[in-house]
Image (cartoon, rainbow, N blue to C red):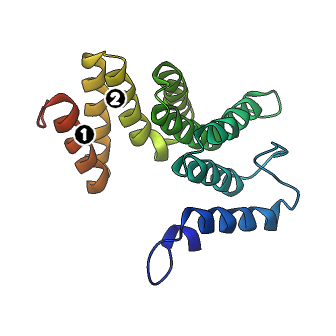
């Protein structure tokens, strides 16, 4: 939480944030090292920390390291050790971060596949917390794959969920992205 909210005089640097996140992770999982993948079964909070660590690596220009972490998390949760219904929220969280990083590295087909999986898990197991952002990412994936009708469909769905849940920040992000990418204004 400290890293998320920042310091009184501003945000933590990427290096400070990474150190703080690793320190927090080691409180509950002392031997965990996201870089060497000895993750073991982790709680949602620990998975969130690992995803934040991967995101920091991506922000620092170390996208391959971030992708390695997400790839390992994704494969681990796909293994027989993790029952999808029990870990659906973790699956969705991992799919969200993994998709963002794949888009950042211009791996659009892979991003589309992971985002679709995340969407399916959210819908099938009632984990709606990450659904609007996954739908927006699907819209972005379709845009980069030059499938504009699908792009609009998913942006519309994300926009409606953001609007219905009162998430004006997300709704405005969609409006701006649709205007920028498609030169359209809502309703589109």
Q: Position of residue 72 (x, y in %)?
A: 73, 35
* Helix, strand or loop for disc 2: helix
User: Where residue 177 is drawn, which disc sits there?
Assistant: 1
Mark 2 or 1 closer to N-term? Answer: 2
Classify 10 Å Cα crowding around label 1: few (below 14), some (14-19), many (20 and above).
Answer: some
* Helix, strand or loop for disc 1: helix
- Asked if marks 2 and 1 touch (Cβ < 8 Å), the reply is yes
Relative height, residue 134 to residue 41 (above, below):
above
Residue 10 lies in quadrant: bottom left
Q: Which of marks 2 and 1 is in front?
A: 1
User: Where residue 139 is drawn, which disc sits there?
Assistant: 2
Relative height, residue 119 to residue 66 (above, below):
above
In the picture provided, is 89 more to the left or to the right than 133?
Answer: right
Residue 110 in sight? yes
User: Where residue 104 is drawn, which disc sits there?
Assistant: none
> Residue, x 36% and y 36% (percent of image)?
136
Q: Where is residue 88 in the image (x, y as percent from the top left)?
A: 63, 38
Q: Distance between the residues labelled 2 and 1?
A: 10 Å
Q: Where is residue 152 in the image (x, y as percent from the top left)?
A: 24, 25
Residue 65 lies in quadrant: top right
> Residue, x 31% and y 16% (percent of image)?
146
Q: Quadrant of the C terminus?
A: top left
Q: Position of residue 137 (x, y in %)?
A: 40, 34
């Amino acid at each position: 939480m400290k890293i998320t909210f920042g310091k009184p005089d501003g945000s933590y640097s990427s290096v400070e944030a990474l150190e703080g996140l690793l320190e927090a992770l080691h409180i509950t999982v002392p031997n965990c090292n996201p870089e060497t993948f000895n993750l073991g079964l982790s709680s949602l909070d620990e998975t969130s920390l690992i995803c934040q660590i991967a995101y920091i690596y991506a922000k620092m220009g170390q996208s391959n390291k971030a992708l390695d972490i997400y790839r390992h998390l994704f494969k681990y949760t796909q293994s027989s050790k993790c029952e999808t219904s029990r870990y659906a929220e973790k699956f969705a969280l991992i799919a969200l971060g993994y998709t963002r990083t794949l888009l950042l590295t211009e791996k659009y087909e892979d991003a589309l596949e992971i985002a679709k999986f995340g969407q399916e898990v959210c819908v099938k197991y009632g984990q709606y917390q990450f659904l609007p952002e996954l739908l927006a990412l699907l819209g972005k994936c379709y845009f980069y794959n030059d499938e504009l009708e699908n792009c609009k469909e998913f942006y519309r769905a994300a926009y409606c969920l953001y609007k219905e849940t009162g998430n004006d920040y997300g709704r405005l992000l969609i409006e701006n992205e649709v205007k920028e990418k498609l030169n359209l204004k809502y309703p589109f």
